[in-house]
Image (spheres, grey):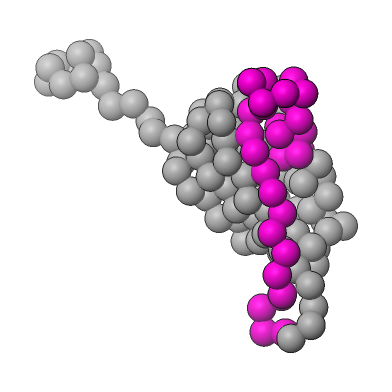
Amino acid sequence: DDGDGDGEPEAEASKIDFLFLDHAKDRYLSDLNELEQADMIGRGSHVVADNVVVNSKELGGYREYVGGLARDGGDAVDKIAETDMIEGRLEYTENLKDGIEFTVYLKDPPRGQI
């Protein structure tokens, strides 16, 4: 019971299953961190970040962060996430390289460590 007198259990906030980041590049990392701290990103969440090659300067911190989640602890048992950059071409062009960073959370990230 959630204490409001209706006898119904309190609804739990669910985690985000799939998040596609394709907005202000300087907000990717801070927005992901906010969602992690709000317990909305965690085990089973899939996060895809667009334009990580063409905007490598702005997104270096983001890629370093998710790479750290994949290296945390040094072995498969301790990893928080798996991440992979998939190369492609920038939309509407024929020869400009770009890519997406595809991250899958294997467990909940630590909270309170921004």
The quadrant holding residue 83 is: top right
Residue under the image location 70 percent in, 70 percent down: 88
Residue under the image location 21 percent in, 19 percent down: 9
In the image shown, does 50 or 102 lie closer to the viewer? 102
Residue 49: percent from the left, percent from the top? 65, 55
Residue at the outermost front position: 76
Q: Is residue 15 left or right of residue 41?
A: left
Residue under the image location 67 percent in, 20 percent down: 78
- In the image, is residue 68 part of the stretch drawn in magenta? yes
**Residue 69 against residue 56 in the figure, above or below:** above
Quadrant holding the C terminus: top right
Q: Is residue 30 visible?
A: no
Q: Is residue 3 left or right of residue 85?
A: left
Residue 112: percent from the left, percent from the top? 66, 20
Quadrant holding the N terminus: top left
In the image shown, does 68 or 41 lie closer to the viewer? 68
Residue under the image location 76 percent in, 39 percent down: 67
Q: Is residue 29 visible?
A: yes
The quadrant holding residue 70 is: top right
Residue at the outermost right position: 57
Residue 32: percent from the left, percent from the top? 63, 41
Count of numbered circles on the image: 0
The quadrant holding residue 104 is: top right
- In the image, is residue 82 part of the stretch drawn in magenta? yes
Report the span colored magenta: 65-93
**Residue 35 against residue 87 in the figure, above or below:** above
